[in-house]
Image (tube, rainbow, N blue to C red):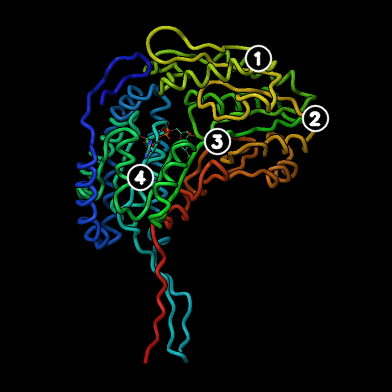
């Protein structure tokens, strides 16, 4: 499989992929290795992950540059992702022992009865991953899953394969046995072959259409399935905001990582009384973003990682124009080498437009005027997705009242496009099922076993 730099179109590597027979062999090896890993004392498994953290620190710049080369992410943002990864690992190192501790929930001396819960690893799981934040979305699964005693068949996205191989190498150097964390390399066909193995769980990050296929493939197996999928995340700007500050924060939430974030801002609703002022401030902000060589320290907008996404963006632009939206900047793919799209802002949009319905996953956004809070909530909830939603206002009570009515896994007051290791990361509707992160995101890689113990 050829690894192509999306910024230049140049081939940067050629890697061997796993066919169905290789996937089967890897599965069998992981199955054989898992029980011994589960018997390693938790303290030692945690020490292994701490050594993995040390490897990341030592390799930091190489990892950042590899990521930039294969996904086109601006190098400063690649470094930020690695720094965020260290913070997530720290959370798991600090919280796992108490979260996985066995719990005595009842004791009755008279009846000589005791009840306890232990947290057993699931066994052998598949971790099928996305390319847009490969360190984040991968580590949300494999770090707590390894700590909990599972073996993992890890399929990085075909667009982030070199990063996936770096991860496997660093875990091996840290002391994770070869057959306990096993990279499985290839495209969707390799992922499908992986799903044909008798796994104990599937943890997937990617798009809704692929997630639906994964759910169908796993359905009859009666195994744990977690799907972290896409979003069409809204922001509502109230009339009492500092317009310039809100525009700057929301533009960053929409365009960071070139708009290729699951929780990127994808729809903006602005109270009619500040609509014109907000739109002007927002466009000025976007026009200040520097596009270009992702290895340049000053670059903020990088390449579009997957070439077919250019067609999705072009289609959304054409559809919005046809339906009467006003194009304020951008609107075109950039001709030449690599995959590039101009940062694009539309005003006067509505929900008849693809731009306000389908995940864009690129540097493009629509801004719609709303009459009042009730209209904003109705529009925010008018989506098949439900990953995140934000409200900007200095009035906390008003924000909390609005956010309580929004169907989303995460809600934000005066911030957006944000993930915390301390909070559960989940979505409703087409944004997925299950969760990662927080202490729930440690327990999710275990099966609670119920012990009823009666003395004689
Ligand atoms: P994708 O669905 O195209 O691919 C994801 C993974 O699935 C890849 O590894 C791919 O090879 C594999 N795959 C494809 N077909 C398969 C099949 N039939 N069987 C098994 N595996 C298969 O998604 P992508 O382009 O890598 O990622 C972008 C999407 O991911 C966006 O929708 C984004 O919003 C979402 N995402 C969600 C989160 C979250 O936390 N909710 C985080 C990051 C990305």
x, y percent for residue 191? 33, 39
Residue 302 in percent (x, y) is at 44, 19
Residue 235: percent from the left, percent from the top? 65, 32
Q: CA distance from mark 3 to mark 2?
A: 24 Å
* Residue density around tag 1, few if under 14, some if 14–19, many if 20 or more, within 10 Å: few
Q: CA distance from mark 3 to mark 4?
A: 20 Å
Question: For mark 4, what is the residue?
Answer: 127
> Separation of disc 3 and disc 1 at Cα?
24 Å
Q: Earlier in the sequence, mark 4 or mark 1?
A: 4
For image coordinates 26% across by 57% down, the residue present is 44
| Left or right of residue 441, residue 409 in this image | right
Question: Which residue is under mark 3?
Answer: 231
Determine whether, in the image, residue 13 is placed left or right of residue 191: left
- Verify CB contact (< 8 Å) between mark 3 and mark 4: no
Label at residue 411: none
Pointer 2: residues within 10 angstroms few (<14), some, or many (20+)?
A: few
Q: Which mark is residue 322?
A: 1
Between label 1 and label 2, give the one nearer the viewer: 1
In what element is the residue under mark 3?
loop
Q: Secondary structure at mark 4?
A: strand
For ligand 1, the image quadrant comes to top left
* Spot occupied by residue 165 in the image (x, y as percentages of width and height): 26, 35
Quarter holding the C terminus? bottom left
Labels 3 and 2: the sequence-earlier one: 3
Along the viewing direction, whichever of 455 and 153 lies nearer the viewer = 153
The quadrant in which residue 87 appears is top left
- Nearest the viewer among 60 and 161 is 161
Q: Secondary structure under badge 1?
A: helix
Task: Note whether ligand 1 is within 8 Å of mark 3.
Answer: yes
Kindly indicate whether the residue at mark 2 contacts the one at mark 1 (C-beta within 8 angstroms).
no
Classed neighbour count for the residue bearing mark 4: other residues with Cα under 10 Å, few (<14), some (14–19), many (≥20): many
């Amino acid at each position: 499989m050829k690894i192509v730099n999306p910024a230049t179109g140049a081939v940067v590597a050629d890697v061997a992929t796993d066919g169905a027979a290789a996937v089967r062999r890897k599965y069998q090896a992981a199955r054989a290795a898992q029980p011994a890993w589960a018997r390693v004392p938790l303290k030692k498994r945690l020490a292994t992950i701490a050594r993995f953290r040390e490897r990341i620190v030592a390799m930091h710049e190489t990892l950042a540059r590899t990521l930039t080369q294969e996904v086109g992410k601006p190098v400063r943002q690649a470094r930020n992702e690695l720094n965020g990864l260290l913070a997530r690992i720290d959370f798991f190192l600090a919280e796992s022992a108490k979260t996985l501790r066995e719990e005595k929930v009842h004791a009755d001396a008279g009846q000589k009865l005791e009840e306890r819960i232990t947290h057993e690893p699931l066994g052998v799981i598949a971790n099928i991953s996305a390319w847009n934040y490969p360190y984040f979305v991968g580590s949300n699964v494999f770090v707590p899953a390894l700590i909990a005693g599972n073996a993992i068949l890890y399929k990085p996205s075909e667009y982030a394969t070199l990063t996936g191989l770096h991860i496997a190498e660093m875990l091996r150097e840290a002391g994770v046995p070869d057959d306990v964390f096993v990279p499985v390399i290839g495209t969707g066909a390799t992922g499908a072959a992986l799903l044909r193995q008798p796994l104990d769980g599937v943890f997937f990050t990617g798009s809704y259409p692929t997630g639906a296929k994964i759910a169908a493939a796993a359905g009859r197996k009666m195994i744990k399935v977690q799907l972290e999928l896409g979003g069409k995340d809204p922001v509502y700007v109230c009339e009492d905001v500092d317009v310039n500050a809100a525009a700057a924060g929301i533009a960053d939430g929409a365009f960071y990582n070139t708009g290729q974030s699951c929780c990127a801002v994808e729809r903006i609703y602005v109270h009619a009384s500040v609509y014109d002022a907000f739109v002007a401030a927002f466009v000025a902000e976007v026009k200040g973003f520097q596009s270009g060589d992702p290895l340049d320290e000053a670059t903020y907008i990088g390449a579009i990682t997957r070439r077919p996404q250019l067609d999705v963006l072009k289609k959304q632009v054409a559809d919005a124009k046809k339906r009467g939206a006003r194009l304020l900047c951008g609107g075109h793919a950039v001709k030449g080498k690599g995959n590039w799209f101009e940062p694009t802002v539309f005003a006067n949009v509505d929900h008849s437009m693809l731009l306000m319905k389908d995940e864009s996953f690129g540097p493009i956004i629509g801004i719609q005027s709303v009459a009042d809070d009730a209209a904003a909530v109705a529009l925010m909830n008018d989506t098949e997705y439900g990953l995140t939603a934000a409200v900007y206002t200095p009035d906390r009570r008003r924000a909390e009242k609005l956010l309580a009515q929004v169907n989303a896994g995460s809600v934000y007051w005066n911030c957006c496009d944000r993930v915390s290791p301390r909070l559960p990361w989940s979505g409703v509707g087409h944004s997925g099922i299950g969760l990662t992160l927080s202490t729930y995101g440690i327990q999710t890689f275990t099966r609670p076993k119920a012990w009823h113990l009666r003395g004689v």
